[in-house]
Amino acid sequence: MSFGTAICAVTGIPGAARAGIGAALCIVLLAGCAGAPAPRPDAADPLRAVEALERQALPSAATVTDVDVLAVSPAMERFLERYLREYPDSRHRVDMLRYVIIHPGLLGFTYDQSRTRTAAAAFEARNGNCLTLSNLFIALARRLGIDAHYQEVSLGNSWTKHEDLYLLNRHINVRGRLRNGQGYVMDFIHIDTELAPNARTVTDARARARAQYYNNLGVEHLYARETAQAVAWFKKAIATAPELDYVWSNLATAYGRVSEYAAAEAAFHTALALNAENWSAINNLAILYRRTGREAEAERALGSIERFRLRNPYYRIELSEQAYQNGDYREAIA
């Protein structure tokens, strides 16, 4: 299936290493130095326990502002009044809301994977990624009395690369139910949710949606190499929805960028305590082990994720380049 313009909500950061193991942001930025294992974080308050391992002053979650991603502006209210309130039936309202958001002669919303925006900011900018579109649609739909919820959809593994960042993408769309009981889905791409068995509605919509918004802002700051700001946004996401294992993995990767290895290891362990099959966290933790002189632990971790790494095209590219540099051209082609 072509993902086209539908992927976003960045999660883990897997990749490929020239050293022969699955790489990540960490492979470039974790300096090679020996170190003792970091203690496992306190289950009662894991974020505070991880922060206690920081060796330098880094911003906390409190340094960034709370954001209501579903706030409706006066301009949005006027838009609803002009185009949608005349339709009393929920089916017509949903259909027309889809139409007016996408139609170039009306709102003309267009896809931009690099931009995560609130509903109000999306309305003004008229572009953004799938989380942005979901924010906009849900905010307007609920204002019209329409049932609308975030839905996380697994469409398989999809990676993108930005400089030294290898990103495993996730997709989110909108699902709701009309007054007659009929369900609907709002998405940039056409999805038969019966064919996406891992699709699930986000029950704590505002908290989890805010956390995903904060997480994406953290990744955008990593793009810009503004690591301190990235750390703050990842912490904000965790404080908002601490159950999101991929945000813990992203925080750990950001820690690695500023040589906070003990805090990074503890954050990776927290991600794995939440999801033992977070392969990108295992991958990145193995990188950390190798870069801190713990070869045996790295090999044990990597042994469990070979199939995951082979599904990453960037890993295969790196294997090909290694073989080419070694003069093994048949292996490089394979």
Image: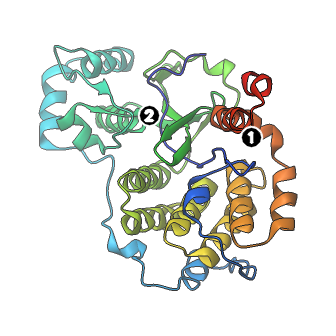
Q: Can the viewer see residue 58 in this picture?
A: yes
Give residue 295's position: percent from left, percent from top: 82, 66
Q: Nearer the viewer, residue 207 or 46?
A: 46
The Cα atoms of the two marked residues, 1 and 2, are separated by 36 Å
Q: Can the viewer see residue 46 in this picture?
A: no
Give residue 317's position: percent from left, percent from top: 65, 33
- Local packing at callout 2 (Cα closer than 10 Å; few below 14, some 14-19, many 20+) is many
Count how many numbered circles sit on residues in the image: 2
Location of residue 67 with respect to 16 vertically, above or below = below
236 with respect to 76 (left or right): right
> Based on the displayed image, in which of its 4 quarters is residue 46 positioned?
bottom right
- Local packing at callout 1 (Cα closer than 10 Å; few below 14, some 14-19, many 20+) is many
Location of residue 272 with respect to 70 vertically, above or below = below
Q: According to the image, label 1 marks what residue?
A: 309
Give residue 39's position: percent from left, percent from top: 73, 81
Q: According to the image, label 2 marks what residue?
A: 148
Q: Amino acid type of disc 2?
A: Ala
Q: Nearer the viewer, residue 140 or 311?
A: 311
323 with respect to 230 (left or right): right
